Amino acid sequence: MKEYTPSEQAEAQDKFEQHQKGREEAKFYRAFLDKLKDQVTGVLLKSGADQGQRDRLEDFESAGILNLKQSIDDAISAANKGVDKPVEHVNVRQELLAEMTQREFVEYIERLKSSLIK
């Protein structure tokens, strides 16, 4: 069995800790994205909106049906409850989300989730 030098052991430990940190962050972001998707689609479903073929999220915001900023804040708060180290700020391009239809929004969220560390 190969003996490792102290520097190799330190490097391995550092990589392990970075991976653990990445998994914890991914856990937060996965929960955040799930909660955001559930909140937005839930509000739209309650409003009687169809699957969002044409209407963009900003159309629902201007009609007072949806508040993206509040949904984002609520999703951050809910996701923080499931992690050891809370995340204080998440960079979300709200204007990009507002330009999407409901279907595009759900697909976008699912793509983001699939890119996270398992």
Image (cartoon, rainbow, N blue to C red):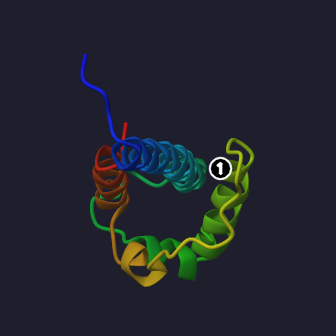
Question: Where is the N terminus found, in terms of image quarters?
Answer: top left
Name above or below for residue 55 compared with residue 17. Answer: below
How far across and down, in percent of the image, does residue 88 sit? 69, 69
Say which amino acid is labelled 1.
Ala
Count all numbered tags in the image, as a single digit: 1
Q: At 51% from the left edge and 71% from the top edge, which residue is drawn?
A: 60
Q: At 56% from the left edge and 52% from the top edge, which residue is drawn?
A: 32
Q: Residue furthest top?
A: 1
Instruction: Indicate left or right for 13 with 108 as reference.
Output: right
Question: Where is the C terminus found, in terms of image quarters?
Answer: top left
Instruction: Indicate left or right for 91 with 105 as reference.
Output: right
Q: Give the structural element (helix, strand or loop) at label 1.
A: helix
Q: At 70% from the left edge and 53% from the top edge, which residue is drawn?
A: 85
How far across and down, in percent of the image, does residue 104 sit? 29, 60
Q: Nearer the viewer, residue 37 or 43?
A: 37
Q: Nearer the viewer, residue 10 or 54?
A: 10
- Which residue is denoted by mark 1 in the rendering? 79
